[in-house]
């Protein structure tokens, strides 16, 4: 598809189903139905290829899971059970990391009982137990209820800890039950490091007002760690849209693979590389500013982006921004503006014969998302799909 594939893709607030249906009814009734079917048939015969890019833990794999939930009937009970070891490992790594950081941060346990539970956890290997026995469960529960561990969690931006640690530890009693089968929300919160390249193929209905039928999508997920990024080029060919995920909540965290590098700075640097990449110059680029819910919780807890990005102070001196009513709104707009500024930088020429990409018309589109929120992702992806199809039809001068 051409660069203008996503030209009309702009962030829109989620609309109730009734409103969306009303909008569909507004298409010209005089448009020949057979002409419209011919146009959409061409779209149906072309698979839309979308590449997910971003740093590690930005939410790429969660988007893949959401596509499966929304468009491939979710997970069977057997598939849910297969996720149990992954969830157990998330819990084990989380409590092990918290216990291990207590001494590093100079935090004391709240009781002698908690200290004994900590010794027990530290005596275990790094891999989670196959079964949640009573002894293990008692120690994990004791630790998570300890005031010292909670104080350690409040400082988790100072060391690597899964975003889902609190979710799983808060639900530990339910998860440790012998009859436990992971819920859809459990699966969305679970994390396993992505290595290599994975893909999902799914079909999405085309609105009747646009000819009906189905559109096939292929979505590719690649590892975001530094040592995995050299594999990305393997899937650049034929990509029509890049979905770049950036975690808004990571402004106060450093990389696992490089503790000296701020995660948000790394994400901005990577976005610049993707935007400037000549192999992706013809692909539409959509940014999901993800995990803004976690970002808002951090700000309520007293964390401030200005402590890591001093230029935020000057940004806030600008004239009042639309819909900026508090620090969370200003922080979201600040991060978005960082990305906008990158898209306005001159393109670097890699060779004499390379086309000057800076002279090409190109746009980037932004959505604030919570990847674990199925309704949010459904609404956003529905807009993306409709806009792609609308652009295909409007490119023929029909609308």
Image (cartoon, helix red, strand yellow):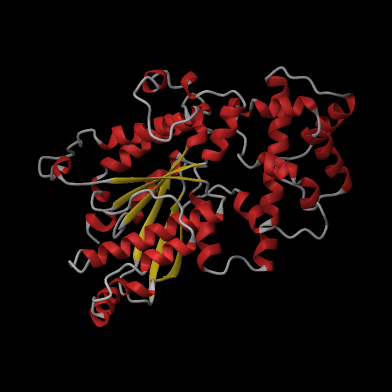
Residue at the spot 84% in from the left edge and 33% down from the top edge: 117
- Spot occupied by residue 53 in the image (x, y as percentages of width and height): 41, 47
Residue at the spot 62% in from the left edge and 65% down from the top edge: 75
Q: Nearer the viewer, residue 97 or 59?
A: 59
The quarter of the rendered structure image containing the N terminus is bottom left
> Residue most toward the left?
353
* Residue 169 in the image: above or below residue 283: above
Residue at the spot 52% in from the left edge and 34% down from the top edge: 249
Location of residue 214 by image quarter: bottom left
Location of residue 181 by image quarter: bottom right
Q: Is residue 393 left or right of residue 360?
A: right
- Spot occupied by residue 206 in the image (x, y as percentages of width and height): 38, 71
- Res. 257 in view: no
Q: How many marks?
A: 0
- Res. 348 in view: yes
- Spot occupied by residue 284 in the image (x, y as percentages of width and height): 29, 52
* Residue 258 in the image: above or below residue 30: above
């Amino acid at each position: 598809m051409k660069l203008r594939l996503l030209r009309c893709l702009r962030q829109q607030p989620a609309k109730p189903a009734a409103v969306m249906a009303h909008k569909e009814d507004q298409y010209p009734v005089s448009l020949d139905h057979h002409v419209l079917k011919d146009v959409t048939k061409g779209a149906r015969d072309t698979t839309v290829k979308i590449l997910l890019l971003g740093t590690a833990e930005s939410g790429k794999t969660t988007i893949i899971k959401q596509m499966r939930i929304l468009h491939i009937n979710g997970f069977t009970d057997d598939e849910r059970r297969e996720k149990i070891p992954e969830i157990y490992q998330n819990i084990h790594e989380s409590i092990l990391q918290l216990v291990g950081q207590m001494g590093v941060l100079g935090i004391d346990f709240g009781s002698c009982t908690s200290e004994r539970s900590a010794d027990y956890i530290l005596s275990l290997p790094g891999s989670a137990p196959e079964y949640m026995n009573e002894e293990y469960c008692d120690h994990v529960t004791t630790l998570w209820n300890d005031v010292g561990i909670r104080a350690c969690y409040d400082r988790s931006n100072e060391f690597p800890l899964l975003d889902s640690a609190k979710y799983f530890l808060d639900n530990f009693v339910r998860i440790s039950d012998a009859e436990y089968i992971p819920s859809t929300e459990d699966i969305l919160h679970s994390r396993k490091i992505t290595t290599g390249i994975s893909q999902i193929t799914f079909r999405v209905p085309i609105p009747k007002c646009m000819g009906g039928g189905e559109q096939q999508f292929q979505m590719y997920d690649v590892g975001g760690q530094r040592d995995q990024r050299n594999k990305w080029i393997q899937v650049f060919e034929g990509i029509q849209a890049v979905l770049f995920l950036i975690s808004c909540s990571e402004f106060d965290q450093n990389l696992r693979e490089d503790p000296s590098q701020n995660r948000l700075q790394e994400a901005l640097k990577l976005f610049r590389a993707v935007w400037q990449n000549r192999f992706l110059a013809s692909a539409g680029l959509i940014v999901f500013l993800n995990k803004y819910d976690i970002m808002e919780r951090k700000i309520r807890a007293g964390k401030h982006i200005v402590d890591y990005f001093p230029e935020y102070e000057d940004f806030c001196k600008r004239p009042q921004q639309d819909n900026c009513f508090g620090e969370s709104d200003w922080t979201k707009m600040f991060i978005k503006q960082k990305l906008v500024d990158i898209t306005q930088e001159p393109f670097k020429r890699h060779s004499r014969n390379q086309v000057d990409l800076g002279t090409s018309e190109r746009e980037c589109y932004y959505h604030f998302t919570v990847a674990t929120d199925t309704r949010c992702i459904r609404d956003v992806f529905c807009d993306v799909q409709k806009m792609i199809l609308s652009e295909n039809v409007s490119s023929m001068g029909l609308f």
